[in-house]
Amino acid sequence: MEKLIQDLEIISTDKQDNCEVRVSREEAVAKDKKLYIESYGCQMNFSDSEIVSSILAKEGYSTTSNAELADVIFLNTCSIREKAELTVRNRLGQLNAIKKTNPGMVIGVLGCMAERLKTQLLEEEKIVDLVAGPDAYRDLPNLVQQVEGGTRAVNTLLSREETYGDISPVRLNSNGVTAFISIMRGCDNVCSFCVVPFTRGRERSRDPESIVREATQLYENGFREVTLLGQNVDSYKWSKVENNKAKLNKIKDAEVVNFANLLEMVAKVHPNLRVRFSTSHPKDITDQVLHTIKNYDNICNYIHLPVQSGNSRILDMMNRTYDREWYLDRVKAIREIIGDDCGISSDMIAGFCSETEEEHRDTLTLMDLVQYDFSYMFYYSERPGTMAERRFEDDIPLEIKKKRLNEIIEKQRQHSLERNKLDLGKVQKILIEGTSKRSDDHLQGRNSANKVVIIPKGNLEKGMYVNVRIEDCTAATLMGREVEL
Ligand code: SAH
Ligand code: SF4
Ligand code: F3S
């Protein structure tokens, strides 16, 4: 989905500005309990941490950025690759020291690792008091109480209905301009390398009314961009009649809200609210979605369309259900319907089971054909319980995996630079997100294609739209200056 922010740590903040804290201040102060939450993995997990914070806010917890002050520490974890799990194990080791200074503190593991390992986590990590899977967050107040009462607590039940649709997330670590909205949960695909269907359960879509309501509230609170999140947004499907996938297939199209319809509904919230989405699946992205993007100025011209491999035999083994030609045809449709300046990014896996040198080169030639603006690139990491683990041998030596990955990364760096150079001299509409990370005299924002643009500060402020002429670039960033139109 999505921008996989591997192993990146985001820590919730105390900042009350732009946060929608849904408990009354009196209640929060009266109970005066502190939650510290760290998120790992994809945007979905970061979004879930905001739901968790909202659920605990109702119990009188406010968030803190200082783990030592916390009554409850949650790690919202990722299982996508072995390294992601190792990072969490190391972090749990570090928390030992903090727990020694405050033995009453509750330490919980949430998210995908919790779901994958269940009670095994309690056996292996003595410091952990609580384990809760992605569909069990409403039970957290009860689980915390159990721990306070002296027993370790676990809930890893997956649900076919839970979407947390009625919960207004507490916006953590927010810039006050951009926000995530989860539109669905789970995944019904079975890509052979992927652990997500096991950790997140069956796919289910959230009521579109609640999505539009959340987008409207965000706009009213000053936000100017929302990213609609799902593992496979193109299979979003919702009907008032019955939100049950088996029955949905029998209901007439006119009665069903599909992803293109939902995009349109959110785009209509306000022309000044930008809409992004992630992740699109090459087998499911429709021309209707592409036309909807074209028809609304505020739906950004950017599609994250992970290919994983450029070779059809490997794609078949990965069970991605499309081949190289199908993928290239979808890219052609994007270029024809939206245009050449539509940003396209990808995820790529190097060294999947039995991949030959020639098949690896197919990934490189596909990259040459598509010219991605950006990619998230990984080498294959075998995950327990997946179809690939059961059926194929993880037979590519680590050095070869790393060598292939480096070739992919180097090619992407060249393409990112080439694509960025095409923007030189153009005037683009930028949404300012805040101060540049490198300089207080500069602001940073994004163009429609999701590229970071740095501009001199002048009298501009975050949340503003500004027309910028692009004057310079690196492979990662565009630099420009405001122009009057
Ligand atoms: N739903 C998204 C992907 C979510 S996981 C999609 O279908 O595109 C994000 C990315 O992690 C995947 O696209 C894939 O490139 C990578 N990934 C998943 N499992 C992996 C594994 N076992 N080893 C290496 N990379 C993996
Ligand atoms: Fe994993 Fe495939 Fe689902 Fe993406 S679509 S989450 S890669 S199973
Ligand atoms: Fe996301 Fe990692 Fe889970 S990528 S869905 S947090 S396994």
Image (cartoon, grey):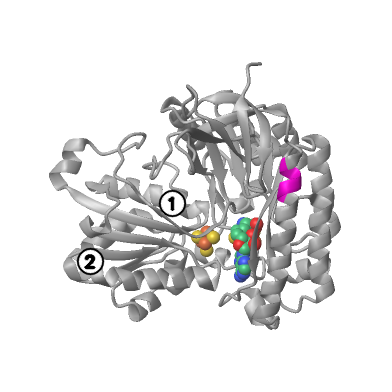
Task: Provide residue 67's location: percent of width, then percent of height.
Answer: 27, 58
Task: Tell me the quadrant of ligand 1.
Answer: bottom right
Q: Label 2: which residue?
A: 147
Q: Is residue 129 visible?
A: no
* Residue stretch in magenta: 416-420
Location of residue 264 with respect to 141 vertically, above or below: above
Query: At label 1, which amino acid type do we have?
Result: Asp
Mark 2, Cα crowd under 10 Å, few <14 / some 14-19 / many 20+, is some
Q: Nearer the viewer, residue 166 or 268?
A: 268
Q: Label 1: which residue?
A: 48
> What label sits on residue 308 in the rendered view?
none
Query: At label 2, which amino acid type do we have?
Result: Val
Asked if residue 357 lies left or right of residue 68, the reply is right
Q: For residue 335, what is the image quadrant?
A: top right
| Image label count | 2
Task: Provide residue 259's location: percent of width, then percent of height.
Answer: 64, 41
Task: Provide residue 222's location: percent of width, then percent of height.
Answer: 44, 27
Mark 1, Cα crowd under 10 Å, few <14 / some 14-19 / many 20+, is many
Residue at position x 34%, y 80% in the image: 123
Residue at position x 73%, y 36% in the image: 423
